[in-house]
Image (cartoon, grey):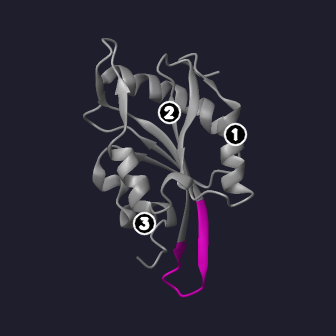
Amino acid sequence: MSQSGATVNQECVTAYNDLKLNKKYKYVIFKLSDDNKEIVVESTSEDGPEYDDFREKLLNAQSKTKTGALSKGPRYAVYDVQYDLASGEGTRNKITFIAWSPDDAGILAKMVYASSKEALKRALPGLAAEVQANDSDDIEWSSLVKTVSKGTAAV
């Protein structure tokens, strides 16, 4: 359980294992349920396998406010980032945890997501990198690869 009291749905672990072990997915996007009590799977790469699809889903994510209105919303995601090394020594894959919390999202949503993040990360063993993304530039492919590869990728 997280500091916010949210629990991780078993479906999250299953989807992550399908990404990590079975290579069934390229990415999995997670969200908090509308009552903020559980972290659940929102979508996977089955719904759109390209990075642009993934990025659009994060940019268009919405959460309900206390009043029930919809506004921009944070999300968690796991992406299997594959890149070529600039040295020409081959290709690398790093399973990357992305905490998407847009600057213009509601304060309550950002607080609940921030306090629930560790519970999800603990349930997903083997994450190689973590990225905190707050605006669209943070989730540009080149920016993501540069961060994950620590500058060793040929972008």
In which image quadrant can residue 12 be found?
A: top right
Q: For mark 2, does the 10 Å Cα neighbourhood hold few (<14), some (14 to 19), or many (20 or more) residues?
A: many
The magenta span reads: 83-94
Task: Specify the label residue 45 is tagged with.
Answer: none
57 relative to 94 in the view: left or right: left
- Residue 79, above or below 151: above
Q: Mark 2 and mark 1: span between their CA atoms?
A: 13 Å
Q: Earlier in the sequence, mark 2 or mark 1?
A: 1
- Amino acid, disc 3: Lys
Residue at image point 41% right, 56% down: 53
Would you say the residues marked 2 and 1 are in contact, meaning their CB atoms lie under 8 Å apart?
A: no
Q: Nearer the viewer, residue 127 or 30?
A: 30
Residue at image point 40% right, 23% down: 111
x and y percentages locating residue 36 in the rendered image: 50, 19
Is disc 1 placed on a helix, strand or loop? Answer: helix
Farthest front residue in view: 47
Would you say the residues marked 1 and 3 are in contact, meaning their CB atoms lie under 8 Å apart?
A: no
Q: Mark 1 and mark 3: span between their CA atoms?
A: 27 Å
Q: Nearer the viewer, residue 9 or 130?
A: 9
- Residue 114, above or below 50: above
Q: Read off the residue under disc 1.
A: 13
Would you say the residues marked 3 and 2 are in contact, meaning their CB atoms lie under 8 Å apart?
A: no
Farthest top residue in view: 67
- Amino acid, disc 1: Val
Residue at image point 34% right, 53% down: 138
- Amino acid, disc 2: Lys
Is disc 2 placed on a helix, strand or loop? Answer: strand
Q: Read off the residue under disc 2.
A: 31
